[in-house]
Image (tube, helix red, strand yellow):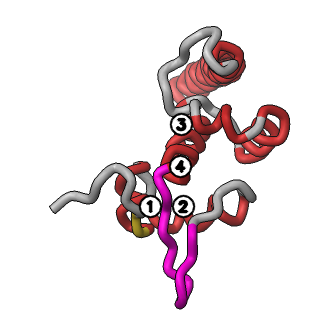
Amino acid sequence: MAKGPDAFRTISEAADEVGVAQHVLRFWETKFSFIRPMKRAGGRRFYRPQDLAVLCGVRRLLHEDGYTIAGVQRLHRERGLGCLLHADSPPRKGVDGQGELAFSASAQAGGLRDRLTATLAALEEAKARLDEVLEG
């Protein structure tokens, strides 16, 4: 029997829903002060639906949009928790500042893509030179 959408989740259930390992959720707790699941006696974590929304937003920013941990911390500091809650939604301009977040995330990802493309070109050039040396 599946839990309802408003039910609390254990760390294993939360990790499955977010798509990361349990140790990643524990690590994020040490890096992001805004991730605070309820803890019961014995230290068992229980994640509320809002906690899951924040975790999904953090995962998207880190794993899909190319943000660093410091970048997510800065984003939270500058724009608050709302931008993290909406980070897991598809980009929509003009809704809760989502357009601005989507632009900065895509701009950062685009810059990363350009750097990776340049690095790949440099590596291919170096490989071609090594192939010439090895053949000659």
- Sequence-first disc among 2 and 4: 2
Q: Earlier in the sequence, mark 1 or mark 3?
A: 1
SS for callout 2? helix
Q: Is residue 96 left or right of residue 19?
A: right
| Residue positioned most to the left | 1
Question: Mark 2 or mark 3, which has the lower sequence index?
Answer: 2
Question: What's the amino acid at mark 4?
Answer: Gln
Q: Amino acid at mark 2?
A: Val
Q: Horizontal placement of 37 versus 34: left or right?
A: left
Tag on residue 50?
4
Q: Is residue 127 left or right of residue 77?
A: left
Magenta stretch contains residue 48: yes
Q: Is residue 70 magenta?
A: no
Q: In the rendered structure, which amino acid carries the disc numbered 3?
A: Arg
Where disc 1 sits, the SS reads: loop
Query: Residue 16 or 62: which is nearer the viewer?
Result: 16
- The residue lying at 46 percent from left, 51 percent from top is 49
Classify mark 4: residues with Cα within 10 Å, few (<14), some (14-19) or many (20+): few
Q: Are marks 1 and 2 in contact (CB under 8 Å)?
A: yes
Residue type at mark 1: give it.
Ala
Locate residue 9: give its quadrant.
bottom left
- The answer to whether one can see residue 69 in this image is yes
Image x and y of residue 63, in percent: 54, 39
- Residue 8, compared with residue 45, is above or below; it is above
The quarter of the image holding the C terminus is top right
